[in-house]
Amino acid sequence: MTAPPSPPTHRRRPRRGSGLGLGTGGHLIGAYGLLGLTALLVLVFSLALPRTFPTLDTLDSILSAQSIPAVLALAAMVPIVTGAFDLSIGYGLGLAHVMVLYLVVEAGWPWPLACLVVIAGGLVVGVLNGVVVEFGRIDSFIATLGTGSMMFAVTGWITDGGRIVPGPQGLPPAFTDLYTSTFLGLPVPAFYVLALAVVLWLVLERLPIGRCLYVVGSNPRAADLVGIPVREYTVCAFAASGLIVGFAGVLLAAQQQIGNPSVGLDYLLPAFVGALLGSTAIKPGRPNALGTLVAVAVLAVGLTGIAQLGADFWTVPLFHGGTLLLAVGLAGYAARRRMRTGAFAARDAPAEASEPPPAPPPTAGSAP
């Protein structure tokens, strides 16, 4: 007697336009389109400004001038991973750089100790922001705007509304070398940015804590159901952001060499533009460190080219504002496309793979 034939398995072919039916071209454009735009801008400005733009001086200027905005953009990116926004980073940057100069110039502290204390203070401020947001149950926009305003008040209290100017002897050369020195012919701050981006990339993409942070940002309720402590991870994200802001404040103090209580606010908008626009590159649909670097590169090349073309001063906020709107729109589109692709993949999967697993046998005391 022959065994009855097994029932045929029907596999549906991927629909045209679904996530499985698309080639790699769309993914490559989404992931590396911003990088291609950077190369295109470099080419356009090099052709338009052949004597000034494609030079080593321009490269050094971009790497040096954009290092602090890049560090602050990475700081803004970390809370965004968890679905929160830290609007206090601009105020924190101003407070951090003023505190460094106050401790070195007014209090006479050794500059290494002053830098460490300010970076540790940034960590404490980040933790407080996270506690206010998560345990105080206050929206991150409102909470960080409130704490940022308080930090701005502390900055004004320390400086008495004026500037902190070093004496005739100036600042220690070893301290200013943190920003002004070079390595392999390139500005040292560029290597700080690269090292920080690599660390954040490894943490977010390769370590379990990074995967948990992404789960918290995509679906906090689901994260809580699978046992991920949502509050603790969100506080950790704010703490990391505050730590990076403290480091950015040290770099800003070494660059400015004068304590200006209002300078930090100028970096707030570029930081969020870089962080949000970066979520459309490399890993479209979610914030990531390398995408943030690419976004900062686009902004740096664009602003440098516009400045060399002789544009008026008002073009800078116009460029940042327009790019922010574009970044938010592209980030939302990338996130929706990512979810739609996942839905198509689940719908077009083989039928046998989508069948629910068999129910477990009833245990003692359960209803039949």
Image (cartoon, grey):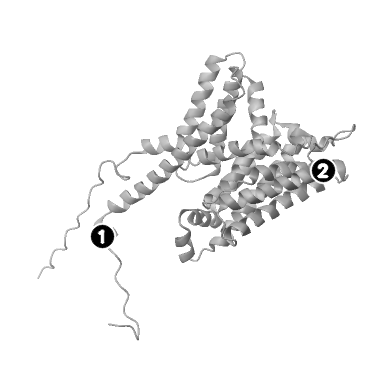
Kindly identify which numbered label has been placed on residue 337: none
Residue 129 to residue 171: above or below: below
Left or right? Give the position of 186 relative to 84.
right
Q: Residue at x 46, y 66 (%)?
A: 225
Among all residues in the image, which is located at the extreme left? 1
Query: Residue 206: horizontal and vertical position, in percent?
Result: 53, 51
Left or right? Give the position of 363 relative to 276.
left
Crowding at dot 1, Cα within 10 Å, few <14 / some 14-19 / many 20+, comes out as: few
User: Is residue 194 shown to the viewer in this render?
Assistant: no
Query: Residue 36: horizontal and vertical position, in percent?
Result: 47, 29
Left or right? Give the position of 176 relative to 20.
right
Quarter of the view holding residue 9: bottom left
Q: CA distance from mark 1 to mark 2?
A: 68 Å
Q: Mark 2 — residue?
A: 102
What is the secondary structure assignment of the residue under circle 2?
A: helix
Q: Residue at x 80, y 47 (%)?
A: 114
| Front residue (pair 277, 3) | 277
Residue type at mark 1 is: Glu
Instruction: Give the mark nearest the N terminus, 1 or 2.
Output: 2
Q: Mark 1 — residue?
A: 352
Query: Residue 190: horizontal and vertical position, in percent?
Result: 66, 34
| Front residue (pair 195, 83) | 83
Left or right? Give the position of 15 relative to 90.
left
| Front residue (pair 291, 253) | 253
